[in-house]
Image (cartoon, helix red, strand yellow):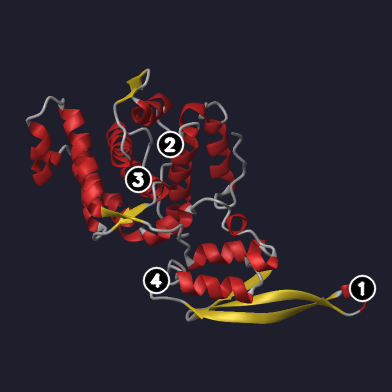
Amino acid sequence: MKQQFPLEELSLEINKEFERIYKTLDDTPFISRGLISYYDVLKAHFVLANYFINEGEKVNYGVKDINILGSALGRQITGSGTYSKWNTSEEICATLFYGLVKNHAFFDVNKRTSLLTLFYQLYKFKRVPNVKLKEFEKLAIDVASDNLESYTNFKKFKNKSFNVQDQRVLCIADFIHSKTRIIDKRIYILSCRELMRLLKKQGFIVELNEQNISILKKERKGWFQKKEKHTKVMSLPLGNKGIRSEISKKMMKEILKNCNLTEKDGVDSKAFYEEEESLVSLIDRYYLPLKRLKDK
């Protein structure tokens, strides 16, 4: 599967580094199984770095050891023949998360890359957290510091014939099972920031102030359509998180209807949303734990 470069959400410099590293890698073993790939983790890392650099943070982004990253990814497909060591979605998420946190494949933001990848993988498995996000933040810290033995559920696996690493993975899997819920339907997580980007790609003008977002439609008027007119389509209020605020499902339906971007208008919703979850919107949703992990 050929991935497209450059990515719109990355700076030119970060795009070049992403493409330089990725062009040497083979993602077939992961993509063919629907698992997290090199591309997914690298994209999470570089989008995360770009996001916080834009906020003024100094991030030493980049891959320290690609073989270590490959080892972490390979944990998802551990086994031989028809035997797979990890089978449930929770176990697959857990073993990759453990490998990413412990292996330190990147120069910086390892825990944050690991946590964002976990949130993305959970979403691919149609699961989302149903507890306070501080619990996932603490999980990342405890995995890094080998503190999982203090978890109550760790005792369930301690006396069985598993090595310590496997006990920790099973503990994380149990945590994920009990701290997440299944999404009943396909729900796109979209922040105001990403909505603005997607609407601009559709030819709309999006104006932002402290209170709301205004969506305007471009129209050509006059002879030879030389005059451009901007017609206001609608305004929507910003939430208390500003452009990081999440767009509700109800509001999203209203926006698409008013902008004539529904299936009735001949617009495929998957094409509008670019077919996969936006990592920028995930960062916006899980901003606080990802931000706090900087100094932990």
**Which x, y percent locates residue 41?**
43, 39
Name the element at disc 1. helix
Find disc 4 in the rendering and name its residue: 241
Q: Is residue 186 above or below residue 153?
A: below
Q: CA distance from mark 1 to mark 4?
A: 43 Å
- Give, as a three-letter code, the residue at label 3: Leu
Q: Is residue 211 above or below residue 9?
A: below
- Give, as a three-letter code, the residue at label 1: Phe
Q: Is residue 24 visible?
A: yes
Q: Which residue is pictured at 38% across the width and 36% down the height?
A: 106
Q: Which residue is pictured at 33% across the width and 28% down the height?
A: 75
Q: Residues within 10 Å of mark 3 (few under 14, many from 20)?
A: many
Name the element at disc 2. loop
Find disc 2 in the rendering and name its residue: 35
Find disc 1 in the rendering and name its residue: 224
How many numbered marks does the figure carry?
4
Mark earlier in primary sequence (3, 1): 3
Q: CA distance from mark 2 to mark 4?
A: 32 Å
Pick the front one: 183 or 41: 183
- Give, as a three-letter code, the residue at label 4: Lys
**Which x, y percent locates residue 66?**
43, 27
